[in-house]
Image (tube, grey):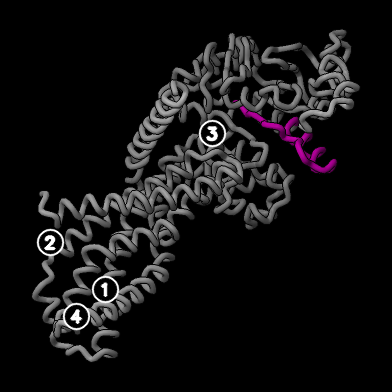
Protein backbone atom coordinates (compact mmCIF):
# COMPACT_ATOMS: atom_id res chain seq x y z
CA UNK A 1 0.00 0.00 0.00
CA UNK A 2 1.10 3.54 -0.70
CA UNK A 3 -0.09 6.81 0.70
CA UNK A 4 -0.26 9.39 -2.04
CA UNK A 5 0.16 13.16 -1.74
CA UNK A 6 -3.48 13.75 -0.91
CA UNK A 7 -3.20 11.31 1.98
CA UNK A 8 -5.38 8.67 0.32
CA UNK A 9 -4.32 5.07 0.60
CA UNK A 10 -4.11 3.32 -2.71
CA UNK A 11 -3.05 -0.16 -3.69
CA UNK A 12 0.46 -0.63 -5.04
CA UNK A 13 0.25 -0.32 -8.77
CA UNK A 14 2.42 -0.55 -11.82
CA UNK A 15 1.92 3.11 -12.67
CA UNK A 16 5.28 4.83 -12.55
CA UNK A 17 5.96 6.99 -9.53
CA UNK A 18 7.71 9.63 -11.60
CA UNK A 19 6.98 10.20 -15.27
CA UNK A 20 8.87 12.65 -17.45
CA UNK A 21 7.10 13.29 -20.74
CA UNK A 22 8.49 15.12 -23.77
CA UNK A 23 10.65 17.43 -21.68
CA UNK A 24 12.20 20.42 -23.43
CA UNK A 25 14.37 22.90 -21.59
CA UNK A 26 16.38 25.83 -22.90
CA UNK A 27 18.83 27.89 -20.87
CA UNK A 28 20.05 31.04 -22.55
CA UNK A 29 20.91 30.00 -26.12
CA UNK A 30 21.60 26.39 -25.17
CA UNK A 31 19.00 23.72 -25.64
CA UNK A 32 19.59 21.37 -22.72
CA UNK A 33 16.76 18.89 -23.25
CA UNK A 34 15.12 18.06 -26.56
CA UNK A 35 12.31 15.71 -25.69
CA UNK A 36 13.27 13.53 -22.73
CA UNK A 37 10.91 10.73 -21.72
CA UNK A 38 11.42 8.63 -18.60
CA UNK A 39 9.39 6.47 -16.32
CA UNK A 40 10.61 5.74 -12.82
CA UNK A 41 9.05 2.83 -11.01
CA UNK A 42 8.22 2.77 -7.33
CA UNK A 43 10.55 1.22 -4.87
CA UNK A 44 13.67 0.97 -7.00
CA UNK A 45 16.93 2.81 -7.49
CA UNK A 46 16.95 4.51 -10.89
CA UNK A 47 20.22 5.97 -12.07
CA UNK A 48 20.46 8.88 -14.48
CA UNK A 49 23.91 8.95 -16.01
CA UNK A 50 25.62 11.00 -18.62
CA UNK A 51 28.77 12.98 -19.31
CA UNK A 52 29.46 16.23 -17.41
CA UNK A 53 27.39 19.09 -18.73
CA UNK A 54 24.68 16.81 -20.11
CA UNK A 55 22.10 18.39 -17.80
CA UNK A 56 21.71 15.68 -15.17
CA UNK A 57 21.45 18.10 -12.26
CA UNK A 58 19.11 20.29 -14.31
CA UNK A 59 16.89 17.26 -14.79
CA UNK A 60 16.72 16.72 -11.02
CA UNK A 61 15.82 20.38 -10.55
CA UNK A 62 13.06 20.00 -13.12
CA UNK A 63 11.74 16.93 -11.30
CA UNK A 64 11.90 18.77 -7.97
CA UNK A 65 10.02 21.73 -9.47
CA UNK A 66 12.83 24.25 -9.00
CA UNK A 67 12.96 24.88 -12.73
CA UNK A 68 10.09 25.02 -15.19
CA UNK A 69 10.38 23.20 -18.53
CA UNK A 70 9.74 24.99 -21.81
CA UNK A 71 7.60 22.09 -22.98
CA UNK A 72 6.59 18.70 -21.68
CA UNK A 73 5.69 17.77 -18.13
CA UNK A 74 6.84 15.93 -15.03
CA UNK A 75 4.31 13.86 -13.14
CA UNK A 76 4.94 12.68 -9.61
CA UNK A 77 2.36 10.18 -8.46
CA UNK A 78 0.11 11.41 -11.26
CA UNK A 79 0.36 15.10 -10.35
CA UNK A 80 1.97 17.62 -12.68
CA UNK A 81 4.77 19.24 -10.67
CA UNK A 82 4.75 22.46 -12.66
CA UNK A 83 1.02 23.07 -12.48
CA UNK A 84 0.93 23.33 -8.71
CA UNK A 85 0.56 26.56 -6.80
CA UNK A 86 3.62 27.62 -4.78
CA UNK A 87 1.94 26.32 -1.62
CA UNK A 88 0.91 23.00 -3.17
CA UNK A 89 4.42 22.54 -4.54
CA UNK A 90 5.92 23.04 -1.08
CA UNK A 91 3.43 20.49 0.32
CA UNK A 92 4.44 18.07 -2.42
CA UNK A 93 8.11 18.53 -1.61
CA UNK A 94 7.56 17.32 1.93
CA UNK A 95 7.19 13.88 0.37
CA UNK A 96 10.53 14.22 -1.40
CA UNK A 97 14.06 14.35 -0.10
CA UNK A 98 17.02 15.67 -2.02
CA UNK A 99 20.68 15.15 -1.39
CA UNK A 100 22.73 17.97 -2.85
CA UNK A 101 26.21 17.69 -4.28
CA UNK A 102 27.65 19.92 -1.57
CA UNK A 103 25.41 18.56 1.17
CA UNK A 104 23.89 22.04 1.52
CA UNK A 105 23.72 21.86 5.30
CA UNK A 106 22.56 25.06 6.98
CA UNK A 107 25.80 26.55 8.17
CA UNK A 108 24.30 28.31 11.18
CA UNK A 109 22.78 25.14 12.65
CA UNK A 110 24.50 22.18 14.33
CA UNK A 111 24.34 18.66 12.89
CA UNK A 112 21.49 17.80 15.26
CA UNK A 113 19.53 20.94 14.38
CA UNK A 114 20.07 20.38 10.67
CA UNK A 115 18.45 16.95 10.86
CA UNK A 116 15.75 18.24 13.20
CA UNK A 117 14.96 21.14 10.84
CA UNK A 118 12.38 19.37 8.61
CA UNK A 119 10.74 17.80 11.68
CA UNK A 120 10.46 21.11 13.47
CA UNK A 121 9.00 23.02 10.55
CA UNK A 122 6.56 20.36 9.37
CA UNK A 123 5.44 18.61 12.55
CA UNK A 124 4.35 19.52 16.06
CA UNK A 125 6.15 16.62 17.68
CA UNK A 126 7.24 17.04 21.28
CA UNK A 127 10.93 17.79 21.78
CA UNK A 128 11.66 14.33 23.20
CA UNK A 129 10.32 12.66 20.09
CA UNK A 130 12.20 14.99 17.77
CA UNK A 131 15.34 14.05 19.67
CA UNK A 132 14.64 10.33 19.31
CA UNK A 133 13.90 10.61 15.60
CA UNK A 134 16.99 12.70 14.91
CA UNK A 135 19.20 10.28 16.81
CA UNK A 136 17.68 7.36 14.88
CA UNK A 137 18.39 9.03 11.56
CA UNK A 138 21.90 9.97 12.62
CA UNK A 139 22.48 6.41 13.86
CA UNK A 140 21.44 5.11 10.44
CA UNK A 141 24.20 7.15 8.79
CA UNK A 142 26.67 6.37 11.59
CA UNK A 143 27.02 9.94 12.87
CA UNK A 144 25.08 9.91 16.15
CA UNK A 145 28.30 10.87 17.91
CA UNK A 146 28.78 13.93 15.70
CA UNK A 147 25.46 15.54 16.59
CA UNK A 148 27.02 18.47 18.43
CA UNK A 149 29.38 19.47 15.61
CA UNK A 150 28.83 22.39 13.26
CA UNK A 151 28.81 21.79 9.48
CA UNK A 152 32.16 23.59 9.14
CA UNK A 153 33.74 20.92 11.35
CA UNK A 154 32.66 18.01 9.13
CA UNK A 155 34.58 16.36 6.29
CA UNK A 156 32.92 16.29 2.86
CA UNK A 157 31.78 12.70 3.27
CA UNK A 158 30.39 13.31 6.74
CA UNK A 159 28.53 16.39 5.55
CA UNK A 160 26.91 14.34 2.82
CA UNK A 161 25.86 11.66 5.31
CA UNK A 162 24.32 14.27 7.60
CA UNK A 163 22.52 15.70 4.58
CA UNK A 164 21.27 12.20 3.82
CA UNK A 165 19.94 11.86 7.37
CA UNK A 166 18.19 15.22 6.94
CA UNK A 167 16.77 14.20 3.56
CA UNK A 168 15.13 11.11 5.08
CA UNK A 169 14.05 12.84 8.32
CA UNK A 170 10.42 13.09 7.23
CA UNK A 171 10.42 9.56 5.72
CA UNK A 172 9.92 10.73 2.14
CA UNK A 173 8.61 8.52 -0.64
CA UNK A 174 11.05 9.82 -3.21
CA UNK A 175 14.64 10.78 -2.75
CA UNK A 176 16.81 12.54 -5.32
CA UNK A 177 20.58 12.20 -5.14
CA UNK A 178 22.63 14.79 -6.99
CA UNK A 179 26.11 13.39 -7.70
CA UNK A 180 26.42 11.68 -4.31
CA UNK A 181 29.89 10.24 -5.00
CA UNK A 182 31.72 13.27 -6.39
CA UNK A 183 34.97 14.08 -4.61
CA UNK A 184 34.74 11.27 -2.05
CA UNK A 185 37.63 9.14 -0.87
CA UNK A 186 37.21 5.38 -1.45
CA UNK A 187 36.04 4.72 2.11
CA UNK A 188 33.31 7.36 2.22
CA UNK A 189 32.35 6.40 -1.33
CA UNK A 190 31.80 2.81 -0.18
CA UNK A 191 29.87 4.03 2.85
CA UNK A 192 27.59 6.17 0.69
CA UNK A 193 26.97 3.38 -1.83
CA UNK A 194 25.95 1.06 0.98
CA UNK A 195 23.80 3.71 2.66
CA UNK A 196 21.85 4.56 -0.46
CA UNK A 197 21.13 0.90 -1.16
CA UNK A 198 20.29 0.07 2.43
CA UNK A 199 18.07 3.08 3.05
CA UNK A 200 16.21 2.40 -0.17
CA UNK A 201 15.43 -1.15 0.89
CA UNK A 202 14.77 -0.43 4.56
CA UNK A 203 12.48 2.55 4.03
CA UNK A 204 10.81 1.38 0.82
CA UNK A 205 11.89 4.57 -0.98
CA UNK A 206 11.99 5.38 -4.64
CA UNK A 207 15.46 6.71 -5.37
CA UNK A 208 16.81 8.65 -8.32
CA UNK A 209 20.60 8.84 -8.42
CA UNK A 210 22.26 11.27 -10.79
CA UNK A 211 25.89 10.43 -11.28
CA UNK A 212 28.73 9.78 -13.68
CA UNK A 213 30.56 7.39 -11.39
CA UNK A 214 29.78 4.32 -13.43
CA UNK A 215 31.00 1.48 -11.24
CA UNK A 216 29.41 2.67 -8.02
CA UNK A 217 26.15 3.71 -9.65
CA UNK A 218 25.69 0.54 -11.65
CA UNK A 219 26.31 -1.53 -8.52
CA UNK A 220 23.21 -0.17 -6.81
CA UNK A 221 20.90 0.77 -9.67
CA UNK A 222 17.91 -1.31 -10.71
CA UNK A 223 17.42 0.67 -13.89
CA UNK A 224 19.61 3.13 -15.74
CA UNK A 225 18.99 6.02 -18.10
CA UNK A 226 21.92 7.45 -20.03
CA UNK A 227 21.37 10.97 -21.30
CA UNK A 228 23.49 12.91 -23.78
CA UNK A 229 22.85 15.67 -26.31
CA UNK A 230 19.56 16.54 -24.63
CA UNK A 231 18.02 13.12 -25.19
CA UNK A 232 17.84 9.71 -23.56
CA UNK A 233 20.61 7.87 -25.36
CA UNK A 234 19.94 4.47 -23.83
CA UNK A 235 18.06 2.89 -20.98
CA UNK A 236 17.82 -0.53 -19.43
CA UNK A 237 19.10 -2.64 -16.59
CA UNK A 238 22.78 -2.30 -15.66
CA UNK A 239 23.49 -5.72 -17.24
CA UNK A 240 21.88 -4.80 -20.56
CA UNK A 241 23.83 -1.52 -20.75
CA UNK A 242 27.08 -3.29 -20.09
CA UNK A 243 26.70 -5.26 -23.30
CA UNK A 244 25.05 -2.48 -25.33
CA UNK A 245 26.52 -2.34 -28.84
CA UNK A 246 25.85 1.36 -29.44
CA UNK A 247 29.34 2.95 -29.64
CA UNK A 248 28.23 6.03 -27.68
CA UNK A 249 26.84 3.96 -24.83
CA UNK A 250 29.80 1.64 -24.89
CA UNK A 251 32.27 4.57 -24.77
CA UNK A 252 30.51 6.03 -21.74
CA UNK A 253 29.91 2.82 -19.82
CA UNK A 254 33.46 1.60 -20.34
CA UNK A 255 35.04 5.01 -19.91
CA UNK A 256 36.99 5.09 -23.19
CA UNK A 257 38.79 8.43 -23.70
CA UNK A 258 38.05 8.73 -27.40
CA UNK A 259 35.11 7.66 -29.49
CA UNK A 260 31.88 9.23 -30.65
CA UNK A 261 32.46 11.81 -27.90
CA UNK A 262 35.79 13.16 -29.18
CA UNK A 263 38.82 13.72 -26.98
CA UNK A 264 39.61 16.95 -28.85
CA UNK A 265 37.57 20.10 -28.62
CA UNK A 266 36.70 21.12 -32.21
CA UNK A 267 39.66 22.94 -33.76
CA UNK A 268 41.31 23.57 -37.12
CA UNK A 269 43.78 21.08 -38.52
CA UNK A 270 46.75 20.66 -36.15
CA UNK A 271 49.55 21.02 -38.72
CA UNK A 272 48.15 24.15 -40.35
CA UNK A 273 47.47 25.58 -36.87
CA UNK A 274 51.13 25.07 -35.87
CA UNK A 275 52.42 26.61 -39.09
CA UNK A 276 50.19 29.68 -39.04
CA UNK A 277 51.64 32.92 -37.65
CA UNK A 278 48.43 34.81 -37.05
CA UNK A 279 46.37 35.41 -33.94
CA UNK A 280 48.02 33.67 -30.96
CA UNK A 281 44.62 32.66 -29.67
CA UNK B 1 23.32 53.88 -34.55
CA UNK B 2 20.36 51.49 -34.72
CA UNK B 3 22.52 49.02 -32.77
CA UNK B 4 23.09 51.59 -30.04
CA UNK B 5 19.43 52.43 -29.76
CA UNK B 6 18.62 48.76 -29.62
CA UNK B 7 21.18 48.21 -26.88
CA UNK B 8 19.79 51.14 -24.93
CA UNK B 9 16.29 49.72 -25.26
CA UNK B 10 17.54 46.32 -24.17
CA UNK B 11 19.15 47.81 -21.08
CA UNK B 12 15.97 49.69 -20.28
CA UNK B 13 13.95 46.48 -20.53
CA UNK B 14 16.47 44.63 -18.34
CA UNK B 15 16.25 47.39 -15.75
CA UNK B 16 12.45 47.33 -15.76
CA UNK B 17 12.46 43.55 -15.53
CA UNK B 18 14.77 43.48 -12.53
CA UNK B 19 12.74 46.25 -10.87
CA UNK B 20 9.64 44.13 -11.38
CA UNK B 21 11.36 41.06 -9.96
CA UNK B 22 12.57 43.09 -6.98
CA UNK B 23 9.06 44.37 -6.30
CA UNK B 24 7.48 40.92 -6.42
CA UNK B 25 10.31 39.72 -4.19
CA UNK B 26 9.61 42.51 -1.69
CA UNK B 27 5.88 41.73 -1.65
CA UNK B 28 6.43 38.02 -1.12
CA UNK B 29 9.00 38.42 1.63
CA UNK B 30 7.34 41.27 3.51
CA UNK B 31 4.37 39.02 4.18
CA UNK B 32 6.33 36.34 6.00
CA UNK B 33 6.49 37.31 9.65
CA UNK B 34 3.70 36.42 12.06
CA UNK B 35 4.64 33.02 13.57
CA UNK B 36 6.34 32.63 16.93
CA UNK B 37 9.38 31.15 15.27
CA UNK B 38 9.43 34.15 12.93
CA UNK B 39 9.76 36.36 15.99
CA UNK B 40 12.76 34.40 17.18
CA UNK B 41 14.42 34.61 13.76
CA UNK B 42 13.68 38.34 13.66
CA UNK B 43 15.25 38.88 17.10
CA UNK B 44 18.34 36.99 15.99
CA UNK B 45 18.66 39.23 12.96
CA UNK B 46 18.06 42.33 15.08
CA UNK B 47 21.16 41.28 16.97
CA UNK B 48 23.27 40.71 13.85
CA UNK B 49 22.04 43.73 11.94
CA UNK B 50 21.23 46.20 14.71
CA UNK B 51 23.25 45.49 17.82
CA UNK B 52 26.45 44.70 15.95
CA UNK B 53 26.16 47.95 13.97
CA UNK B 54 25.80 50.01 17.15
CA UNK B 55 29.50 50.59 17.71
CA UNK B 56 30.29 51.97 14.25
CA UNK B 57 27.14 54.10 14.17
CA UNK B 58 27.57 55.59 17.65
CA UNK B 59 31.28 56.31 17.28
CA UNK B 60 30.65 57.97 13.91
CA UNK B 61 27.80 59.96 15.45
CA UNK B 62 30.06 61.22 18.21
CA UNK B 63 32.75 62.38 15.79
CA UNK B 64 30.31 63.97 13.37
CA UNK B 65 28.70 65.91 16.23
CA UNK B 66 32.13 67.05 17.40
CA UNK B 67 33.25 68.16 13.93
CA UNK B 68 29.94 69.91 13.32
CA UNK B 69 30.29 71.80 16.56
CA UNK B 70 33.87 72.79 15.82
CA UNK B 71 33.13 73.99 12.29
CA UNK B 72 29.91 75.71 13.35
CA UNK B 73 31.62 77.55 16.16
CA UNK B 74 34.34 79.03 13.98
CA UNK B 75 31.71 80.48 11.65
CA UNK B 76 29.14 81.53 14.25
CA UNK B 77 31.71 83.23 16.47
CA UNK B 78 32.48 85.70 13.65
CA UNK B 79 28.96 86.98 13.97
CA UNK B 80 28.87 86.73 17.74
CA UNK B 81 26.18 84.10 17.35
CA UNK B 82 27.92 81.15 19.04
CA UNK B 83 24.93 80.86 21.37
CA UNK B 84 23.04 79.37 18.42
CA UNK B 85 25.51 76.47 18.24
CA UNK B 86 23.14 74.01 19.95
CA UNK B 87 20.41 74.86 17.49
CA UNK B 88 22.71 74.44 14.51
CA UNK B 89 24.14 71.12 15.65
CA UNK B 90 20.75 69.67 16.57
CA UNK B 91 18.96 70.73 13.40
CA UNK B 92 21.70 69.55 11.04
CA UNK B 93 21.87 66.23 12.81
CA UNK B 94 18.19 65.54 13.22
CA UNK B 95 17.10 66.68 9.78
CA UNK B 96 19.96 65.46 7.63
CA UNK B 97 23.10 63.96 9.00
CA UNK B 98 21.70 61.37 11.37
CA UNK B 99 19.34 59.70 8.86
CA UNK B 100 21.72 59.98 5.90
CA UNK B 101 25.04 59.07 7.48
CA UNK B 102 23.53 56.31 9.61
CA UNK B 103 21.94 54.85 6.44
CA UNK B 104 25.26 55.02 4.56
CA UNK B 105 27.10 53.35 7.43
CA UNK B 106 24.32 50.78 7.70
CA UNK B 107 24.61 49.99 3.98
CA UNK B 108 28.36 49.46 4.36
CA UNK B 109 28.24 47.47 7.58
CA UNK B 110 24.96 45.53 7.55
CA UNK B 111 23.82 45.76 3.91
CA UNK B 112 26.97 44.25 2.46
CA UNK B 113 26.95 41.51 5.12
CA UNK B 114 23.33 40.66 4.29
CA UNK B 115 24.10 40.38 0.59
CA UNK B 116 27.17 38.24 1.16
CA UNK B 117 25.39 35.98 3.65
CA UNK B 118 22.32 35.34 1.51
CA UNK B 119 24.53 35.03 -1.58
CA UNK B 120 26.72 32.44 0.08
CA UNK B 121 23.63 30.53 1.18
CA UNK B 122 22.53 30.54 -2.43
CA UNK B 123 25.94 29.49 -3.74
CA UNK B 124 26.14 26.56 -1.31
CA UNK B 125 22.61 25.47 -2.28
CA UNK B 126 21.26 26.12 1.21
CA UNK B 127 18.35 28.12 -0.20
CA UNK B 128 17.53 25.40 -2.74
CA UNK B 129 17.72 22.69 -0.12
CA UNK B 130 15.40 24.74 2.08
CA UNK B 131 12.95 24.91 -0.81
CA UNK B 132 13.25 21.17 -1.30
CA UNK B 133 12.50 20.58 2.37
CA UNK B 134 9.31 22.52 1.73
CA UNK B 135 10.25 25.74 3.51
CA UNK B 136 10.00 29.01 1.63
CA UNK B 137 13.39 30.77 1.92
CA UNK B 138 11.66 34.09 1.34
CA UNK B 139 9.77 33.64 4.60
CA UNK B 140 12.48 31.91 6.54
CA UNK B 141 15.65 33.70 5.41
CA UNK B 142 14.68 36.94 3.72
CA UNK B 143 11.65 38.16 5.72
CA UNK B 144 13.33 38.26 9.17
CA UNK B 145 16.30 40.13 7.70
CA UNK B 146 14.10 42.60 5.86
CA UNK B 147 12.03 43.39 8.95
CA UNK B 148 15.06 43.54 11.20
CA UNK B 149 16.70 46.09 8.90
CA UNK B 150 13.51 48.11 8.71
CA UNK B 151 13.32 48.38 12.50
CA UNK B 152 17.03 48.56 13.30
CA UNK B 153 18.07 51.51 11.14
CA UNK B 154 15.58 54.05 12.60
CA UNK B 155 16.70 53.02 16.09
CA UNK B 156 20.34 53.39 15.09
CA UNK B 157 19.51 56.79 13.60
CA UNK B 158 18.05 57.95 16.92
CA UNK B 159 21.20 56.75 18.67
CA UNK B 160 23.36 58.55 16.11
CA UNK B 161 21.47 61.81 16.68
CA UNK B 162 21.64 61.63 20.47
CA UNK B 163 25.34 60.84 20.56
CA UNK B 164 26.04 63.48 17.90
CA UNK B 165 24.33 66.19 19.95
CA UNK B 166 26.36 65.10 22.95
CA UNK B 167 29.55 65.23 20.84
CA UNK B 168 28.62 68.78 19.84
CA UNK B 169 28.14 69.61 23.50
CA UNK B 170 31.55 68.20 24.44
CA UNK B 171 33.36 70.34 21.88
CA UNK B 172 31.16 73.43 22.02
CA UNK B 173 30.59 73.75 25.75
CA UNK B 174 33.40 71.84 27.43
CA UNK B 175 36.17 72.79 25.06
CA UNK B 176 35.26 76.02 23.26
CA UNK B 177 33.40 77.58 26.16
CA UNK B 178 29.91 78.21 24.76
CA UNK B 179 27.51 78.88 27.63
CA UNK B 180 25.82 75.60 28.55
CA UNK B 181 22.42 77.16 29.17
CA UNK B 182 22.24 78.72 25.73
CA UNK B 183 23.44 75.51 24.03
CA UNK B 184 20.50 73.56 25.42
CA UNK B 185 17.83 76.27 25.58
CA UNK B 186 18.38 77.44 21.99
CA UNK B 187 18.10 73.83 20.91
CA UNK B 188 14.95 73.35 22.94
CA UNK B 189 13.36 76.49 21.54
CA UNK B 190 14.08 75.80 17.89
CA UNK B 191 13.72 72.03 17.46
CA UNK B 192 10.16 71.00 16.71
CA UNK B 193 9.39 67.42 17.61
CA UNK B 194 7.11 66.65 14.67
CA UNK B 195 8.84 68.75 12.00
CA UNK B 196 12.43 67.95 12.82
CA UNK B 197 12.61 64.75 14.85
CA UNK B 198 9.54 63.22 13.18
CA UNK B 199 10.66 64.01 9.64
CA UNK B 200 14.14 62.68 10.41
CA UNK B 201 12.62 59.41 11.55
CA UNK B 202 10.38 59.21 8.49
CA UNK B 203 13.50 59.67 6.36
CA UNK B 204 15.30 56.90 8.18
CA UNK B 205 12.30 54.57 7.79
CA UNK B 206 12.39 55.15 4.02
CA UNK B 207 16.17 54.63 3.92
CA UNK B 208 15.86 51.50 6.06
CA UNK B 209 13.37 49.98 3.66
CA UNK B 210 15.38 50.86 0.57
CA UNK B 211 18.80 49.80 1.88
CA UNK B 212 17.59 46.49 3.32
CA UNK B 213 15.53 45.77 0.23
CA UNK B 214 18.50 46.37 -2.07
CA UNK B 215 20.77 44.26 0.16
CA UNK B 216 18.54 41.19 0.43
CA UNK B 217 17.47 41.33 -3.20
CA UNK B 218 21.06 41.59 -4.43
CA UNK B 219 21.93 38.57 -2.27
CA UNK B 220 18.96 36.53 -3.45
CA UNK B 221 19.30 37.43 -7.11
CA UNK B 222 23.05 37.13 -7.60
CA UNK B 223 24.97 34.73 -9.82
CA UNK B 224 26.05 32.03 -7.33
CA UNK B 225 29.82 32.15 -7.89
CA UNK B 226 32.55 33.85 -5.88
CA UNK B 227 32.77 36.59 -8.50
CA UNK B 228 28.99 36.99 -8.44
CA UNK B 229 28.99 37.43 -4.67
CA UNK B 230 31.73 40.04 -4.69
CA UNK B 231 29.98 41.99 -7.46
CA UNK B 232 26.62 41.86 -5.72
CA UNK B 233 28.16 43.06 -2.45
CA UNK B 234 29.70 46.02 -4.23
CA UNK B 235 26.42 46.73 -6.00
CA UNK B 236 24.58 46.74 -2.68
CA UNK B 237 26.82 49.45 -1.26
CA UNK B 238 26.84 51.53 -4.45
CA UNK B 239 23.09 51.32 -5.17
CA UNK B 240 22.14 51.87 -1.53
CA UNK B 241 24.36 54.91 -1.17
CA UNK B 242 23.05 56.47 -4.38
CA UNK B 243 19.46 55.67 -3.45
CA UNK B 244 19.88 57.16 0.02
CA UNK B 245 21.44 60.38 -1.25
CA UNK B 246 18.95 60.76 -4.11
CA UNK B 247 15.94 60.04 -1.94
CA UNK B 248 17.28 62.38 0.73
CA UNK B 249 17.12 65.24 -1.72
CA UNK B 250 13.57 64.38 -2.73
CA UNK B 251 12.40 63.95 0.86
CA UNK B 252 14.11 67.15 1.98
CA UNK B 253 12.47 69.04 -0.88
CA UNK B 254 9.06 67.74 0.17
CA UNK B 255 9.54 68.11 3.93
CA UNK B 256 11.48 71.32 4.28
CA UNK B 257 11.51 72.88 0.81
CA UNK B 258 7.92 74.07 0.85
CA UNK B 259 6.84 71.62 -1.87
CA UNK B 260 4.30 69.86 0.31
Residue at 82%, 20% in the rendered image: A268
Marks 4/1: CA–CA distance: 22 Å
Q: Quadrant of the N terminus of chain B?
A: top left
**Which residue is under mark 4?**
B76
Which-is-in-front pick, marks 3 and 2?
2
Kindly indicate whether the residue at mark 2 contacts the one at mark 3 (C-beta within 8 angstroms). no
Q: Residues within 10 Å of mark 4 (few under 14, many from 20)?
A: some
Which element type, helix, strand or loop, lies under badge 2?
helix
Q: Nearer the viewer, residue A85 or A248?
A: A248
Which-is-in-front pick, marks 1 and 2?
2
Residue B73 shown in magenta: no
**Which residue is under mark 1?**
B162
**Which residue is under mark 2?**
B195
Q: Tally the numbered discs.
A: 4
Judging from the image, mark 1 belongs to the subunit labelled B
* Looking at the image, residue B75 lies above or below residue A22: below
Residue at 83%, 14% in the rendered image: A260
Residue at 57%, 29% in the rendered image: A96
Side (left or right) of B91 relative to A270: left
Q: Quadrant of residue B45?
A: bottom left
**Which residue is under mark 3?**
B132
Query: Mark 4 or 1 closer to N-term?
Result: 4
Marks 3/4: CA–CA distance: 64 Å
Residue B226, how many percent across, how many down? Answer: 61, 46
Judging from the image, mark 2 belongs to the subunit labelled B
Q: Residues within 10 Å of mark 3 (few under 14, many from 20)?
A: many
Which-is-in-front pick, marks 3 and 4?
4
Amino acid sequence: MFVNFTGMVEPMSDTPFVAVEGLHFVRGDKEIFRGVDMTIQRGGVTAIMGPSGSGKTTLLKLIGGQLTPDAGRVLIDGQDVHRQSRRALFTMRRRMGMLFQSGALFSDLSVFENVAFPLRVHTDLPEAMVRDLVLMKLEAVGLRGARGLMPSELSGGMARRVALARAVALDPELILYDEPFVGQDPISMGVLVQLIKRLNQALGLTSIVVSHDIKETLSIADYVYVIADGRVMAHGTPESLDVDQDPRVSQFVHGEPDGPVPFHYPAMDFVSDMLSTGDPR
Amino acid sequence: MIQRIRRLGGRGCDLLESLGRASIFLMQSAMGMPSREGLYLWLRQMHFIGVLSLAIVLVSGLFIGMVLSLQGYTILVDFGAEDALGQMVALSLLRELAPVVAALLFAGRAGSALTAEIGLMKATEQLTSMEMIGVDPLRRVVAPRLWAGFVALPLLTVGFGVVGIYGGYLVGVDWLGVFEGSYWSNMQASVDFVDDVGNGIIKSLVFALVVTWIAVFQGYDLVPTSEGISRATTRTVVYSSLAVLGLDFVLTAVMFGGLA
